[in-house]
Image (cartoon, rainbow, N blue to C red):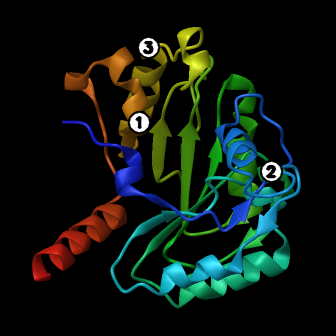
Amino acid sequence: MSVCIKDQIQNMNLVIGCTIGCDYCYARNNVNRWHMTEDFNKPVYFPGKLRMMDRKRPQNFLLTGMSDLSAWKQEWLDEVFSKIRHNPQHQFLFLSKRPDLLHIETDLENAWFGVTVTRQADLWRIDALRNNVKAKHYHVTFEPLFDDPGTIDLNGIDWIVIGTMTGAQSRKIQTNPAWTYSLTEQAHSLNIPVFWKEDLIPIMGEESMIQELPASFNKVLEEQNQWKTKR
């Protein structure tokens, strides 16, 4: 049975706002609907949310669900990285569509840096990630996938996620199953785990779903279950 990725990885929206301006951005729509900030085009940092990292119960956190890492100020990064270092019980993910603007070097064992690729024209982002971010772990999210990305250099990548368009536009735009299978085969040939998001179920079929997590993420989930048992 398939699972929802949000049940495996929790959003911690430390920064709300993005300067990129994707026309399919769900985060902008949510901010405008719920009036979270005055202007989505001006990222706002919420340091009070860092308290969530002090929880002893291990969790997998996505820190850029409503922002792009490229727009984070250096002082925000410094504070967040320090907090991550002192909370090794968690795993933390970052995503960017502008890795060419990043200049990061870290030895954090529990920080994952990734890029979003939506089409073949975005493949440069993977190279830029490896060149501009020197880190222990890399991941790539192919979502929403608009065309066939073809053959990809996934060397050094530790995890990939694949998804399709959601919301009203999903009636017109869908990921082709052949693209999903091709990406999966390429990743598996390098022993890279692959996670198909639950929005692919209508396209790929429940019985075909592949939802693999990195070993360190699975360890966090196992420890979460142990906490539940102790209670």
User: In the rendered structure, are the residues bearing label 2 and label 3 in contact, judged by CB atoms less than 8 Å apart?
Assistant: no
Q: Does 220 appear above or below 161? A: below
Image position of 230 with respect to 7: above or below: below
How far from the left and from the top, in percent, is residue 17?
Answer: 78, 54
Q: Quadrant of the N terminus?
A: top left
- Residue 205 coordinates in the image, percent (x, y): 28, 19
**Residue at the extreme top:** 172
Using the image, tell me which numbered label, if any, was put on residue 178.
3
Q: Is residue 17 left or right of residue 177?
A: right
Gap between marks 2 and 1, in whole Å? 23 Å
- Judging by the rendered image, the residue that carries numbered circle 2 is 18
Q: Nearer the viewer, residue 123 or 225?
A: 225
Confirm whether residue 136 shows in the render: yes
Residue shown at the point (48%, 87%) measured from the top left: 54
Instruction: Tell me if mark 3 has few (under 14), some (14-19) or many (20+) residues whose alpha carbon lies within 10 angstroms of its own.
Output: few
Judged left or right of residue 52, residue 31 is right
Q: Position of residue 142 (x, y in %)?
A: 56, 34
Check the picture and name the quadrant holding the C terminus: bottom left
Task: Decide if residue 189 is in sight here.
Answer: no
- Mark 3 lies on a secondary structure that is helix
Q: In the image, what residue type sits under mark 1?
A: Lys
Considering every residue shown, the one lying at the far front of the view is 34
Q: Earlier in the sequence, mark 2 or mark 3?
A: 2
**Label 1 sits on residue:** 197
Graded by Cα atoms within 10 Å as few (under 14), some (14 to 19) or many (20 or more), the crowding at tag 2 reads many
Q: Is residue 146 left or right of residue 229?
A: right
The quadrant holding residue 124 is top right
